């Protein structure tokens, strides 16, 4: 697989973007690489890359899984692609299914499912639907910048509230505060919890690692706002990256607890498919002195590989260092005062028994529902 920079030259990434590469996806049969032949002006003249949001109508909206190490069976993703630009994002390879790059394309070509709420209403209304918690933010962030204008996530939450459908939210954006008017009544009915993903408190690392996310301090403020309003809030330390942010686990847990978080979980760095090459390039650009050490420790936790896709170990890793991380996290949670329940059980507190489909609306012919 050929890797290319934005102009074919090995330069620093554009400001505000996580990746400087735009590799072909793994399904492409032809690899292209741009180069400067000296005849045409360089298209990459330092101008900021603009984000293109493509509005589309999806065919379905609830994705289901049977993964034993994921704490939910169904999820809703209002957006594909994510402008936050996290260099490590495990969702990047999904853009290959659209013949787009998991690199720059993933964070500049965002697909917005504008009919998400309409589809969700239909799916929840089906007679065969069996209520289980829906996860928002399982793949890409439901509160990325496009949400401010489009409000798709908000419309999904409105439907969930109407149906008493429980929801677990994971986000890196303080924009979640905008929807407190929906979240607070849902929380009072035990229908929602929110996890803010905070993997470090160093703003210099954060602006490189997660260039368009809310700053760590701002995410802590969001935890505080949620908690004060009565919405159960937690912190997700993800991903834990050896030699880069693993030393901040305890500090993040303490700061999040002080802000009001009462549940916590973590995930070790995952590098599936094209992500491994993108992350290696990011490391070499931003932390060249640490790059070999980081990848060496990753290999130690992944059985000598860049990535371990196996259930049971893909989220936590294996080996001595992974075991040390697990013990550190458990000890810190106990010392600080977090709930003893594991992140895998966090949705058990949400109530699925209240689910009710609203009364059917009369049809255009005036025929009422029998029940």
Image (tube, grey):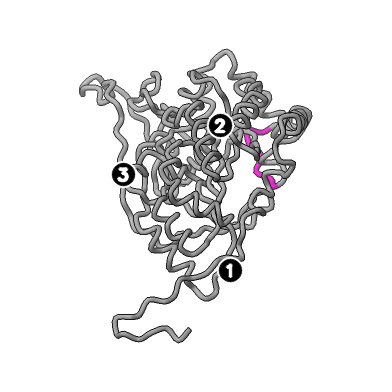
What's the magenta bit mostly, secondary-structure-wise? loop
Q: What is the x, y in percent for residue 207? A: 46, 23
Among the 4 quarters of the image, the one containing residue 316? top right
Q: Which residue is mark 1?
A: 130
Residue drawn where x is 71% and y is 41% of the image = 339
Question: Dot 3: what SS?
Answer: helix
Which residue is depicted at the point 41% across and 40% down? Answer: 144
Residue density around tag 3, few if under 14, some if 14–19, many if 20 or more, within 10 Å: few
Q: Which mark is residue 149?
A: 3
Region in magenta: 305-311
Tell me, yes or no, if residue 370 can be seen here: yes
The residue identified by callout 2 is 198
Q: Nearer the viewer, residue 71 or 201?
A: 201
User: Mark 3 vs mark 2: which is more N-terminal?
Assistant: 3
Camera-side residue: 52 or 211? 211
Relative vertical location of residue 133 with respect to residue 148 in this rendering, above or below:
below
């Amino acid at each position: 697989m050929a890797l290319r920079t934005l102009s074919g030259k090995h330069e620093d990434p554009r400001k505000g973007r996580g990746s400087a590469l735009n590799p072909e996806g793994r399904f492409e049969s032809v690899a292209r690489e741009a180069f400067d032949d000296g005849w045409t002006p360089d298209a990459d003249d330092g101008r900021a890359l603009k984000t293109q949001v493509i509005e589309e109508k999806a065919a379905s909206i609830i994705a289901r899984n049977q993964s034993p190490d994921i704490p939910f069976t169904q999820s809703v993703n209002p957006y594909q692609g994510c402008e936050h630009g996290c260099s490590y994002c495990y969702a990047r390879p999904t853009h290959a299914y659209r013949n787009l790059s998991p690199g720059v394309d993933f964070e500049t070509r965002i697909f917005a499912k504008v009919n998400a709420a309409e589809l969700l209403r239909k799916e929840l209304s089906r007679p065969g639907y069996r209520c289980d918690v829906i996860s928002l933010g399982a793949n890409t962030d439901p509160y990325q910048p496009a949400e401010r204008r489009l409000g798709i996530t908000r419309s999904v939450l409105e439907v969930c509230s109407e149906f008493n459908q429980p929801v677990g939210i994971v986000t890196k954006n303080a924009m979640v505060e905008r929807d407190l008017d929906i979240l607070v009544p849902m929380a009072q009915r035990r229908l929602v919890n929110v996890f803010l993903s905070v993997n470090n408190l160093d703003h210099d690392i954060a602006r490189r690692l997660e260039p368009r996310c809310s700053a760590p301090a701002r995410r802590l403020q969001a935890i505080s706002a949620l908690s004060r309003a009565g919405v159960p809030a937690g912190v997700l330390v993800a991903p834990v990256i050896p030699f880069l942010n693993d030393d901040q686990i305890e500090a993040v847990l303490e700061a999040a607890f002080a802000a009001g978080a009462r549940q916590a979980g973590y995930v070790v760095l995952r590098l599936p498919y094209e992500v491994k090459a993108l992350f290696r390039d990011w490391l070499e650009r931003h932390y060249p002195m640490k790059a070999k050490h980081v990848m060496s420790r990753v290999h130690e936790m992944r059985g000598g590989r860049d990535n371990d896709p196996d259930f049971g170990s893909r989220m936590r890793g294996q080996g001595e260092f992974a075991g040390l991380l697990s013990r550190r996290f458990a000890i810190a949670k106990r010392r600080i005062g977090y709930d003893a329940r594991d992140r895998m059980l966090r949705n058990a507190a949400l109530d699925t028994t209240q689910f009710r489909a609203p009364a059917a609306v009369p049809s255009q012919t005036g025929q009422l529902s029998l029940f």
